[in-house]
């Protein structure tokens, strides 16, 4: 509930008048993350410190949530590990947290009679892109334990949906979430040196790191550097809200890309960040990062057509909001 994407989800649900309850084990957030979220929502939230792998504690949290907020309509599952490189070093931990944690959650949902489930999947399930833009019908493959964990969950959700005609499940394939809440009160808090491009770029902008290492400039892309589909975290969570509204009216299993459909290169991201912050971002071209691909961006038309959702924030908004947050987090 207090991680990067979940916290923005809670803020939106709260703003729209929904009753929300959540859990977190603070593995990638802190108690201050919860406090900031409560400041933003101007209320105490129904929250329990729980590891999603702990069945007894999860049932306790669901019992409390039901007592306080009434029967639970839907579960949104953001509790997963997400660092691609780390996943190859500690695959068992990734499988235990991501796969066993999801199974545990689904088991608890069954016991509480909850039928609606929104799962945070990833564009990583497309592996090496078959084509660009990537549409939901493209073949899937896994290239690392993180991606495998997402793909395994996607597949087991097919079995669960097939076995129970009352289930309503949506798998959302995220492209590259960036940005922060426009209030500047919540955002991403990466542990240690960030793996992802934009948190790294902002650590350079705030002077905490000396330069951005650009992983390769010999890809077949507009300027040779990696192209990705960056999506504002607030757009991403509004996609979840659209998905859960759609599930309220539709049984079965659904899959949507959440992206903007636009691709920007690493150098374009650095240049726009320089323009918006007014700060020079030193960078150096280094080797390609193992496992990286040149160009990944979404065909976002299915979500537009079925969910009536599309991203609204542009690249400058993403960078400006993340900069507001990075400056604050740096103080
Ligand atoms: N990059 C750099 N330098 C850095 C970090 C990244 O040049 O220090 C480049 C990468 O090579 C890539 C682009 O910036 O071209 C974006 O890299 P990120 O690490 O920010 O994001 P990825 O696209 O590699 O990965 C993200 C998520 C994964 C998810 C994947 C799905 O981090 O969890 O998208 O496509 F699985």
Image (cartoon, helix red, strand yellow):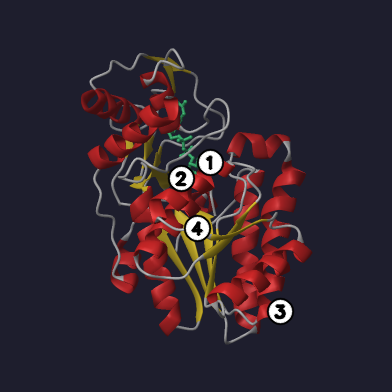
**x, y percentage for residue 104?**
72, 65
Spatial CA span between label 4 and label 3: 27 Å
Residue 32 numbered mark, or none: 1
- Nearest to the eye among marks 3 and 1: give it: 1
Specify which label sits upstream in the sequence, 4 or 2. 2
> Going by the image, does 69 lie left or right of 247?
right
Spatial CA span between label 4 and label 2: 11 Å
- Element class at badge 3: helix
| Viewer-side residue, 133 vs 18 | 18
- Element class at badge 2: helix
Q: Please tell me how crowded label 1 is: few (under 14), some (14-19), or many (20+) other residues with Cα within 10 Å.
A: few
Q: Please tell me how crowded label 3 is: few (under 14), some (14-19), or many (20+) other residues with Cα within 10 Å.
A: few
Circles 4 and 2 in contact, beta carbons < 8 Å: no
- Element class at badge 1: helix
Residue for badge 2:
36
Specify which label sits upstream in the sequence, 4 or 3. 4
Residue for badge 3:
111
- Nearest to the eye among marks 3 and 2: give it: 2
- Nearest to the eye among marks 4 and 2: give it: 4
Residue 44 numbered mark, or none: 4
**x, y percentage for residue 133?**
35, 52
Spatial CA span between label 1 and label 4: 13 Å
Q: Is residue 130 visible?
A: no
Circles 3 and 1 in contact, beta carbons < 8 Å: no
Q: Is mark 4 within 8 Å of ligand 1?
A: no
Spatial CA span between label 3 and label 1: 32 Å
What residue do we see at 64% from left, 43% from top? 27
Q: Quadrant of the C terminus?
A: top left
Specify which label sits upstream in the sequence, 1 or 4. 1
Looking at the image, residue 264 lies above or below residue 133: above
Circles 2 and 1 in contact, beta carbons < 8 Å: yes
What residue do we see at 38% from left, 60% from top? 12
């Amino acid at each position: 509930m207090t991680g990067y994407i979940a916290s923005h989800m809670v803020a939106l649900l709260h703003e729209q008048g929904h009753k929300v309850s959540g859990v977190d084990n603070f593995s990638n957030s802190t108690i201050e993350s919860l406090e900031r979220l409560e400041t933003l929502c101007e209320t105490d939230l129904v929250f329990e410190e729980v590891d999603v792998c702990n069945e007894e504690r999860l049932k306790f949290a669901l019992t409390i949530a039901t007592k306080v907020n009434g029967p639970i309509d839907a579960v949104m599952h953001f509790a997963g590990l997400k660092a691609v490189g780390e996943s190859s070093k500690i695959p068992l931990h990734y499988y235990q947290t991501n796969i066993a944690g999801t199974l545990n959650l689904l088991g608890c949902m069954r016991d509480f009679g909850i039928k609606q489930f929104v799962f945070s999947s990833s564009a990583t399930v497309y592996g090496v892109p078959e084509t660009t833009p990537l549409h939901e019908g493209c073949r899937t493959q896994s290239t690392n334990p993180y991606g495998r964990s997402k793909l395994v969950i996607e597949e087991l959700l097919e079995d669960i949906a097939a076995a129970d005609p009352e289930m309503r499940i949506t798998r959302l394939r995220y492209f590259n979430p960036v940005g922060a809440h426009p209030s500047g009160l919540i955002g991403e808090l990466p542990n240690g040196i960030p793996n992802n491009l934009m948190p790294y770029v902002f650590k350079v902008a705030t002077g905490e790191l000396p330069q951005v290492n650009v992983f390769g400039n010999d890809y077949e892309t507009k300027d040779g550097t990696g192209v990705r589909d960056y999506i504002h975290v607030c757009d991403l969570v509004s996609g979840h809200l659209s998905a859960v509204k759609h599930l309220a009216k539709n049984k079965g299993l659904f899959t949507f890309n959440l992206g903007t459909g636009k691709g920007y290169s690493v150098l374009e991201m650095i240049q726009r960040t320089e323009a918006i912050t007014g700060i020079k971002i030193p960078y150096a071209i280094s080797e390609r990062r193992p496992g990286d691909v040149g160009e990944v961006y979404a065909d976002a038309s299915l979500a537009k057509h079925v969910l009536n959702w599309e991203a609204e924030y542009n690249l400058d908004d993403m960078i400006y909001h993340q900069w507001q947050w990075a400056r604050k987090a740096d103080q």
